[in-house]
Amino acid sequence: MALLTKKVPDPWSMVYHWFIEAISTVINIILIIWPGVIGIGYRKIAIFRYWRKMGLEEDSHRSMMSYLRQADETFRNGFETEEMKQIFLKNTFEGISGSEISFCMQKSFSFVLEQMIKESEFETVLNFYFTIKNDWLQIANNQAGCHVLQAAAECLVRSLPKSKTLSTDVADKLSSFNDIIDISAESLCSVMEGIHSTHALRSHVQMLGGFVLLRTKASSKTKEVKLPKENVPKGYLKTLQTICRCLCEINKQKFVTYLSNPHVGPFISCLFEVVSKRDLPKTLRRLCKKIMSCSEGDTAKTTLLLLIKDKLASHVLETVLEFGTEDAKKEICDLLFEDNKRFFDLCAHPAANFVIQRLITSAKNDVEFNKIFEFISCGLEDILAGQNYGIVQKLCEQCVQFTDSQKTFWDKLLEAFHCEDANQRTFVVLFLASLKTCDAYYKSDTQEEKLIPPIEKVEYHGSILLQTLLKFKNVGLIVKSMCETSIENIITLSCDSSGSHFIDAFYASDKVKPKKKKEFVEKIGKELVSLACDKYGSRVLENIWDNSDIVIKRIIAGNLAQNSPRLSANDYGKFILKKFDIKNFTTRLQEWEQFQKKKSNKRKLFAGIASGTKHQKKKKINSFSNH
């Protein structure tokens, strides 16, 4: 593949240049022959030369645009080798030399540059970033340019050479990035407040700390990067500390407004996370002290409570609870637990309840968690009644880690759902799945065990809660409830977008005995065809199949084989017939069983490799060990 190394001049632009030069020559000759108009002539020449210069620059820029479009088209077509791609990218960035700033600030071309930067080597990106560093602020304030700066800063961290000793040229260029912005309280405020520059500043702060943080917690396309402290370029951490010091110099009133600012608040959270993960304790204490200083004075508690209730400031306080010092956490915790009624009012608040969720997950040991658990568990019913399911879910997740609280959590949960006697607890799965108390679930006052109404709707948070409860040490109550649940309700759960995930988790759980799994399959045997013909039910059936031994697979295949015509007429059923190989089951049973055993063994082997466990042969038990 031919590499794009230089720009090809446009023939029409060459003709245009020759024409301009010819006109200029003619005017100079006239001025020499007719000296009487020299004064006027010089002014005309100055104006004319200005026009010519503007025309040449515009034409040159147009040529550059054509060049970058051609480069983008070649880049999208791909390359045979990685080496060819890197040579091409290096030549492309050299080819647009002098027009980088203009292209960064144009939407269409900034996207091209952003994609090329992500695929370029460290040296190419370093030279590009070094070229535009003097105009960093201008580019950062541009809607398109800020994305280019973010991509470049991220790429520099990801591709920074791992060797501790860098070449003098590379080290000098990296050190020059310390002075990209004027680090003072005033200049920092103007950059933080910018709609676009705040994003570029966040990336710059991450680069100074040697990090690439995930922009969203659920992001899976990119991974978080943390450079070893010794690999962070010289002077970067000092610059980071200077930025923190300038932030702390902002007066209290202005800082409080910044916490609820949509542009500054996220930057402060980002800075907090970088400082905490980079392990700079003095700087972290200074930041925490600055934030908690907002709660000093006569209106201390009122100010902090307003921040907790604020939609944007609450995110900053969540960051403090997650990454801040123990003193800052204790101060927030004491304020929240000071008044019982106020606490549960905050649980119902659309913004403050997330701060309480973060408080629950921030517990690092049994002592911290027990204090939080005892306070919240007393009002579990009120929290559920207010539909603040996130707090209950976080509490349940933490109980998986701190096992001593699991029994108490179950007791409080059953009490909140009014499951007082053993008969009511038998159907706890239905109550939790629908998030209705025992009283609300029954349509009439007659609560007969065998006449329990079918579940009407499976709630998303109810399904999530049940899946988390399956991770507890003791899942006997859920297993017993599933055994007593009617086939109709099991099918409803399996064919629901939320409930299907609970059935998957139930059957895949190691804490549910194989005997109970077999009973579960035998119970819904005749209705397996209903699962196979449903969008979500067919997925449940696949997961049951993948987690079953050959005995249970034979039961499933036998029931489905009896309903082959119905399955063949259904889109989801056709897929089940093909995957389970029902045709060979009915005609070549022995071969079918051998194939399923081999397939099951392969799946177990790959599952072991994926989880990092080594399959070892079981040691023979010494016969004397029993004596």
Image (spheres, grey):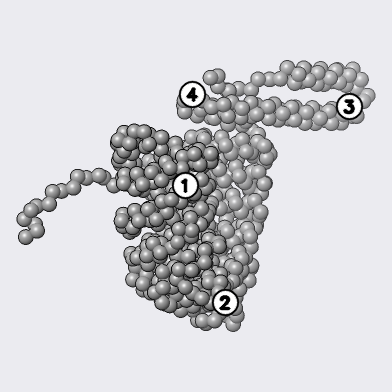
**Depicted 554 relative to depicted 388: above or below:** above
Q: Position of residue 531 (x, y in %)?
A: 48, 49
Residue at image position (41%, 46%) is 559
Seen from the viewer's position, the closer of residues 18 and 537 is 537
Q: Nearer the viewer, residue 216 or 626?
A: 626
Q: Amino acid at mark 3?
A: Gly
State which tag comes first along the sequence, 1 or 4.
Answer: 4
Question: Residue 529: which numbered mark, if any?
Answer: 1
Disc 3 from disc 1: Cα separation:
96 Å
Give the residue number, with chain letter if any, for mark 4: 80
Front-most of 239 and 316? 316
- Label 3 vs 4, first from the N-terminus: 3
**C-alpha distance separating marks 2 and 1:** 48 Å
- Distance (Cα) linking label 2 and label 3: 83 Å
Mark closer to the observer (2, 1): 1
Three-letter amino acid code at the position of disc 4 = Glu
**Label 2, label 4: how far apart the Cα atoms are:** 62 Å
Callout 4: helix, strand or loop? loop
Quick one: label 2 or label 4, which is nearer the N terminus?
Answer: 4
**Is label 2 or label 4 in front?**
2
**Residue found farthest to the right:** 36
> Where residue 41 is drawn, which disc sits there?
3
Task: Identify the mark at residue 345; answer none if there is no mark.
Answer: 2
Q: For label 1, count other residues whose C-alpha is less than 10 Å away and answer few (under 14), some (14-19) or many (20+).
A: many
